[in-house]
Every structure is written in C-alpha cells, then in structure tokens.
C-alpha cells in the first residue's frame, strides 16, 4: 500500500497460544505485530524504537510484570502500553495506570474490545500510521504557527501569496497536501526557508 506504514505492535505474553491468537488478529487488522514469550527480551526491542504500541500481559505473578512496565517506561516514556490480565484486580489496575498504561483489558480477550482500545490509542496518542497524513499535519501545524506568530489572517496570507483562503486553510488543517510551488510561495510570504515546514518531522 503506497504511502502507508503499518503500526508496529509488540505483544509480550508468556502464554504462547494467547500470543498467536493476538498476533493473528492484529495482522488481520492491518497492523504489524511482533510477539515475545520472554519478557526479558522486550527492553532491547523497545529501545530500538521500532514500536509505537506495546500490549503487555500483567497476569500473576504480577510484581515482575509491573516492574517490567516500569522499565518499559524508563526505556521509552512516550510509548503507548496496553495491559491485559487473566485475573483483573483493582490493585493491579491502579498500579498499571500509575505507570501510564493506556488501558487495562481482561483475558480471554474480546477482539472487538481490543480493536476499540487500539483505535482509541491511535486517535488519542497520535499514532498515525499514514505517513502522508502525518506529513500534512506537521506542515499544516508549522504553517499555522508561523502565520499566527506574524499576526496574519488567512485572508492576508492569501493576498500575499496569490493562493486561496480555502487552500491555505485546508493545508493548515492537514487536509490538503501542499505542492512544492505552494510551499515556496508560503515560505516567501512568511520570510522563512522552505525547510522550516519540515523541521519537526
């Protein structure tokens, strides 16, 4: 699929059957899962920065798994972690949430719930899997920041560039891709280099 990058998901569960089921489901959903039965091996994988989402089993014995969640947080404070357990308790849920777990789901997994949780994580954590959408959003954000810093209205910027207000608005919202010619006009009007729009990407 051109321009698309599948979400990389790391599944950490010592139950091999559960790993296989979840991996198959995630593959069918269009994600790119990698399953580990050995929790100790996950930290190196996470440090490589390949994964945007971790699904971690915190079933008993709980303490080493909560410790692992804390180590995951130390290795990557921003990575999205969904926890799952065969024996849910309030205590474990609270401990998981204290380590910034995105959600806490019960096993055996209801795949509809897993789907909903992952979609919520993508939406709320900004886990964009469409590279073109991410590029458009970042360029739009930088354009809006510069325009507002210069105290220009959309109409004023449109007058400076010869572009329509509608097009500039669509670019700022990340709903339209700007051509190189359009970016050059915007950069000239805002007195920045074209690279300004890509500095945070």
Image: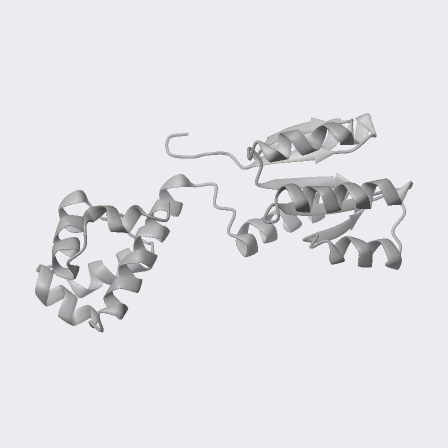
Is residue 48 visible to the viewer in this orientation of the structure?
Answer: yes
Answer with left or right where residue 91 lies relative to residue 131: right
**Identity of the residue drawn at 70% across and 40% down:** 55
In this view, 165 is above or below 116 = below
Residue at 20% across / 48% down in the picture? 194
- Which residue occupies the foreground of this view, 154 or 97? 97
Q: How is the image coloured?
A: one colour
Q: Quadrant of residue 8?
A: top right
Q: Reply above or below: 177 against 13.
A: below
Q: Which quadrant of the rendered structure holds the C terminus?
A: top left
Query: Is 41 displayed left or right of 142 in the figure?
Result: right
In the image, farthest residue toward the front: 74
Q: Is residue 149 above or below residue 102?
A: below
Specify whether 191 is left or right of 17. Answer: left
**Residue ID at (52%, 47%):** 127
Q: How many marks?
A: 0
Relative to 86, say whether 95 is above or below.
below
Q: Is residue 160 left or right of residue 137?
A: left
Q: Quadrant of the N terminus?
A: top left
Q: Quadrant of residue 36?
A: top right
Q: Position of residue 135 (x, y in %)?
A: 35, 45
Residue shown at 30%/46% (left/top)? 198
Q: Position of residue 116 (x, y in %)?
A: 64, 50
Q: Position of residue 11 (x, y in %)?
A: 70, 34
Q: Is residue 29 visible?
A: no
């Amino acid at each position: 699929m051109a321009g698309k990058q599948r979400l990389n998901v790391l599944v950490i569960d010592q139950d091999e059957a559960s790993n296989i089921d979840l991996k198959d489901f995630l593959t069918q959903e269009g994600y790119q899962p990698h399953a580990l039965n050995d929790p100790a091996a996950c930290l190196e994988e996470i440090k490589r920065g390949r994964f945007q989402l971790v699904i971690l089993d915190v079933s008993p014995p709980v303490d080493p798994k909560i410790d692992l969640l804390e180590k995951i947080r130390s290795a990557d404070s921003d990575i999205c972690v969904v926890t799952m357990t065969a024996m849910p308790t309030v205590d474990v849920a609270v401990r998981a949430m204290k380590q910034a777990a995105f959600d806490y789901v019960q096993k055996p997994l209801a795949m509809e719930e897993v789907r909903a949780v992952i979609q919520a994580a993508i939406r709320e954590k900004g886990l964009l899997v469409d590279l073109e959408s991410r590029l458009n959003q970042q360029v739009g954000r930088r354009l809006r920041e510069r325009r507002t810093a210069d105290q220009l209205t959309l109409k004023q910027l449109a007058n400076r560039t010869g572009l329509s207000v509608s097009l500039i608005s669509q670019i700022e919202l990340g709903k339209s891709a700007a051509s190189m010619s359009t970016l050059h006009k915007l950069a000239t009007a805002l007195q920045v280099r074209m690279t300004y729009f890509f500095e945070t990407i």
